[in-house]
Image: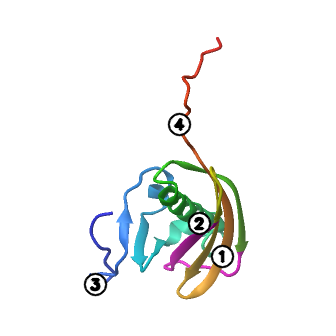
């Protein structure tokens, strides 16, 4: 993360854009901020994030949640790659054009290779979604792979 984010008036907000590439750059940028020991991830919404009835599409919210899970899991695994095994989302309210979606995720339980997480998403102080996920830590294989062809 480099540099602090700015609001419409140029004021520093504490949010920093993450340049991570891939899908999130297409709907983002993904934003991050840290308060005490918790990271929060954000996404500023605009017209491209809306569904046909004019609300932020649930898939946008799901993408933000999945990325929050991945970032928390990545840090907890010693920055090893992780993959989403399962994710359950409960939509609690609607987000609208111009809302900043804010997601936070925490680890509820962990085993040697699996992380169990919970997350919440808010927009302008309103609950938008809650979710749970199972993330698998991807460790490099110890042996060389063999080509069977």
Q: Which residue corresponds to the image point at 54% horizontal and 73% vertical from the top-left? A: 103
Q: CA distance from mark 2 to mark 3?
A: 27 Å
- Which residue reaches farthest bottom? 125
* Residue receiving disc 2: 65
Q: Secondary structure at mark 4?
A: loop
* Residue receiving disc 3: 11
> Where are the magenta residues, as a range?
91-108
C-beta proximity under 8 Å, tags 3 and 4: no
Q: Secondary structure at mark 3?
A: loop
Q: CA distance from mark 3 to mark 4?
A: 44 Å
In primary-sequence order, the first of circles 1 and 3 is 3
Residue 18 at x, y percent in the picture: 38, 62
Judge depth for marks 2 and 3 and give the one in front: 2
* Residue receiving disc 4: 140
Q: Which residue corresponds to the image point at 57% horizontal and 22% vertical from the top-left? A: 145
Q: Nearer the viewer, residue 133 or 125?
A: 133
């Amino acid at each position: 993360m480099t540099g602090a984010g700015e609001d419409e008036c140029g004021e520093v907000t504490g949010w920093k854009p993450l340049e991570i590439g891939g899908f999130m750059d297409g709907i983002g940028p993904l934003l991050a901020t840290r308060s005490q020991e918790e990271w929060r991830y954000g996404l500023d919404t605009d017209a491209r994030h809306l569904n046909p009835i004019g609300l932020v599409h649930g898939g946008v919210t799901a993408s933000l949640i999945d990325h929050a899970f991945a970032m928390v899991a990545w840090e907890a695994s010693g920055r090893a790659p992780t993959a989403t095994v399962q994710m359950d989302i409960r939509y609690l309210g609607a987000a609208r054009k111009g809302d900043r979606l804010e997601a936070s995720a925490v680890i509820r339980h962990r085993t040697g290779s699996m992380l169990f997480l919970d997350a919440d998403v808010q927009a302008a102080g309103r609950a938008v979604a809650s979710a749970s996920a199972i993330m698998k830590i991807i460790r490099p294989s110890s042996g060389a792979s063999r080509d069977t062809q």
